[in-house]
Amino acid sequence: MEAGGCRYQFRIALLGDAAVGKTSLLRCYMRGAPGIPEPELELESAPTVGVEFYTRTVQLQAGPRVKLQLWDTAGQERFRCITRSFYRNVVGVLLVFDVTNRKSFEHILDWHQEVMATQGPDKAIFLLIGHKSDLQSARCVSTQEAEELAASLGIGFMETSAKSNCNVDLAFDTLANTIQQALWQGAIKLEEDWGGVRLIQNTQISRLPSRMQHPGPCRC
Ligand SMILES: Nc1nc2c(ncn2[C@@H]2O[C@H](COP(=O)(O)OP(=O)(O)OP(=O)(O)O)[C@@H](O)[C@H]2O)c(=O)[nH]1
Ligand SMILES: [Mg+2]
C-alpha cells in the first residue's frame, strides 16, 4: 500500500441514533492505541455535540500501516445538519445500533440511506454494529435479525460492547481491512476532491491519537 514514501489515510464515521454508544465504542478503541496509557474504562455519559475526531494508525492484515481518521458524530437530530456535511467525505461507516433499543435498529435503514444518497452507490464501505452486547437480558434485537438486515444491505455485521471490551478492536480492524481490499481491487478509487481515502506523507503520520472538536475542513 505504500507508494513513494506515502501511505493512506482512511476516513471513517460512526453513525447511529443518540445514546447507542458510538462515543463509548470509539473511546474504548482509542484506549488500545500504541503509546496511550490505559486508564480505567469510563463509558461516555455526555451526548456528543456536533462532530469530534480521533486518529489511530493501524497495521493492516496485508502489511501496510494506514492512518484511520475516526469521526464520532452526534446522534441527536438537532445536530443532523452538521453531521450530514461529513457523509460525502468518508470511505467507511460504522452503522451503530443498541441491541436493547429497538428503534435504533429500525433507524439503521435511514442512516444507510442518508449516506448512500450523499455519496452515490459503491463509495462507502459499511459495517453494521449491534452495540451493548453485554446487556443480554435487556436485548430486544436478535443477532439473527441483525444479520438478516446486514445481508439485505450487502454489508457485514458484528456485535460489540465497550463495557466488556468485546469485539471493539475487531470491528475497526475489519472495516479497515475491507476498505483496503476494496482499494486494491479498484472498487474504491482515489479522487482528488474526495477526502475518504487520501495519500499522506510519512512525516505526517502520528502514532499518537489526537482529538479535536468541530475541526472544519481537514487537510492532513
Ligand atoms: N451496558 C453498556 N452501556 C454502554 C455501552 N456503551 C455505551 N454505553 C452507555 O450508553 C450511553 C450512551 O453512550 P454514548 O457513548 O454517549 O452514546 P452516543 O451514541 O455517543 O450518543 P450521542 O453522542 O448522543 O449520539 C451511556 O450511558 C454509556 O455509558 C456498552 O457497551 N454497554
Ligand atoms: Mg456520542
Image (spheres, grey):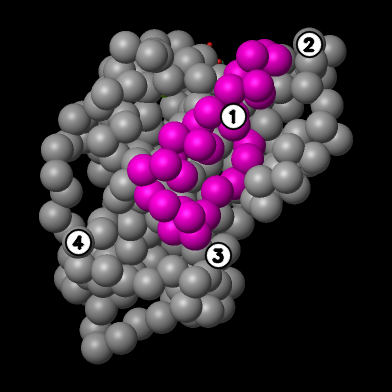
Q: Crowdedness of circle 2 by 10 Å Cα count: few (<14), some, many (20+)?
A: few
Which numbered disc, 2 or 4, marks the residue closer to the eye? 4
Foreground pick, 124 / 99: 124
Q: Which mark is residue 193?
A: 4
Q: Does the beta carbon of the residue at mark 4 sit less than 8 Å from ligand 1? A: no
Classify mark 1 as within 8 Å of ligand 1 or not, answering yes or no. Answer: no
At mark 1, the secondary structure is: helix
Q: Residues within 10 Å of mark 4 (few under 14, many from 20)?
A: few
Q: Residue at x 65, y 21 (%)?
A: 106
- The stretch in magenta equals 101-129
Q: Is residue 108 magenta?
A: yes
Callouts 2 and 3 close, C-beta under 8 Å:
no
Q: Is residue 34 above or below residue 182?
A: above
Residue 138 is labelled as 2
Tag 3 secondary structure: helix
Task: Name which residue lies at 31% across and 29% down.
Answer: 83
Name the quarter where the N terminus is drawn. Answer: bottom left
Decide which of tag 4 and tag 1 comes sooner along the chain: 1
Marks 2 and 4 sit apart, C-alpha to C-alpha, by 45 Å
Q: What's the residue type where badge 1 is placed? A: Ile
Residue 125 in view of the camera: yes
Residue type, label 2: Ala
- Mark 1 closeness class: few <14, some 14–19, many ≥20 residues within 10 Å: many
**Closer mark to the observer between disc 1 and disc 3:** 1
Q: Is residue 29 left or right of residue 197?
A: right
Residue where numbered disc 1 is placed: 108
Return the x and y of residue 165 as percentages of the image width and height.
64, 35
